[in-house]
Image: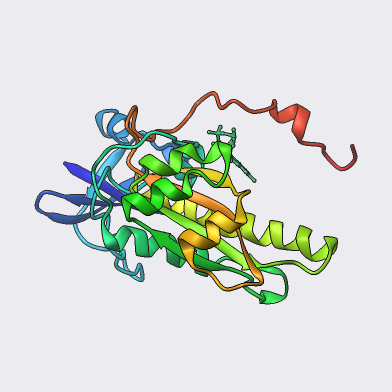
Amino acid sequence: MPTRVWRVHGTTLHVAADDGPHWWQVDPNWADETSWNTRQSAGALTAHPARPEGDPAPAPLGCTGGPCPMETWDAVRARRDVREFRDTPLHDADLERVLEAGRRAPSAGNLQPWDFVLVRDRDRLRALSTVRQGAGHVAGAQAAVALVALVPADDEQRSILAFDLGQATMLMALVAADLGIGTAHSAAQDQAAAQEVLGFPDGRFLAFMLSLGHPAGRPLAVITRPDRRAYADVVHLERW
Ligand SMILES: Cc1cc2nc3c(=O)[nH]c(=O)nc-3n(C[C@H](O)[C@H](O)[C@H](O)COP(=O)(O)O)c2cc1C
C-alpha cells in the first residue's frame, strides 16, 4: 500500500511504500484527482512493478518533519495565513528549502533586491513581533524570515520592489506549505527597532516578515471553499 505520494508524472503515480518506492499506473480518468486512497479503493490504480522506461527516478522530497509532501496544486490550495504555531521545532533542511525557494524567485531585471534574515531565537522573534501592530504572530513562530531590501529611490522602484518581494514571499510560503509548515505575513513599521534587532546596514529596511511553524490548530489541508471573491467576479475573458 502506498504511504506517501511523491509526485504524479502523466498517468504515473510515484509513491513510497513500506517496502520501498513503487510506481503505479493511474486510470487517466482519475489523472487530475488527488484522492489517492479513494482511487485505490475504487480500483483505479494498478501496481507497476518497475519504473516506466525513460522515466527518471523521483527525487526524494526530503520531508524531514510534519505531514507528507503535497503536490504543487495541493500546496496552492492549502496555504493560508497561520498565526498560531506548535512548539515543534522546524528542521534545518526544511528551512533551507524555504529560503532556497526565495532565493530562486524571479525579480525585475534579475536584480534580486533582497536579503533574507532567518530568525529562530525566541527573544529576537518576540522583539520583531513589536515592529508592527499586525506582527504579533512572529512572537510565537518557530522561525521568521525577515525580508530586507535597499530603500527604493522612487515610487517606480518601490512598486517593482514590492512585486519582487511578493513573489519571493509567495514561493517561500508555498514551499513551506508543501512541507506542511504554516506561514503568516507581516509588514513592518518601526524600522529603527527592526534594525536594532536584525542589525542590517543603513540604507536598507525591513520590508516584510514571514512567520513559520507547524499550525497549532488544524494542519494544512486543501481548502475547498476559500475566503476569496468568486472566480467569475475576478476573471475576465478577453475583455473586462
Ligand atoms: C502585503 C501583505 C501584508 C500583510 N501584512 C500582514 C500583517 O501585518 N499581519 C498579518 O497578520 N497578516 C498580514 N498579511 C496577511 C493577510 O491578512 C492575509 O494574506 C489575508 O487575510 C488572506 O488570508 P488567507 O490567505 O489566510 O486567506 C499580509 C498579507 C500581505 C499580502
Q: Residue at x 82, y 37 (%)?
A: 236
Q: Quadrant of ligand 1?
A: top right
Which quarter of the figure has residue 51? bottom left
Q: Is residue 232 left or right of residue 173?
A: right
Q: Position of residue 212 (x, y in %)?
A: 40, 47
Q: Is residue 69 above or below residue 196?
A: above
Question: Which quadrant of the figure contains the N terminus?
Answer: top left
Q: Position of residue 239 (x, y in %)?
A: 90, 40
Q: Residue at x 55, y 45 (%)?
A: 186
What is the residue that sits farthest to the left in this orientation? 19
Q: Nearer the viewer, residue 91 or 39?
A: 91
Whether residue 177 is visible here, answered yes or no, is no
Q: Position of residue 100 (x, y in %)?
A: 44, 67
Q: Nearer the viewer, residue 55 or 100?
A: 100
Question: Which quadrant of the figure contains the C terminus?
Answer: top right
Q: Is residue 168 above or below residue 3?
A: below
Whether residue 128 is visible here, answered yes or no, is yes
Q: Position of residue 25 (x, y in %)?
A: 32, 49
Which quarter of the figure has residue 56? bottom left
Q: Residue at x 27, y 42 (%)?
A: 67
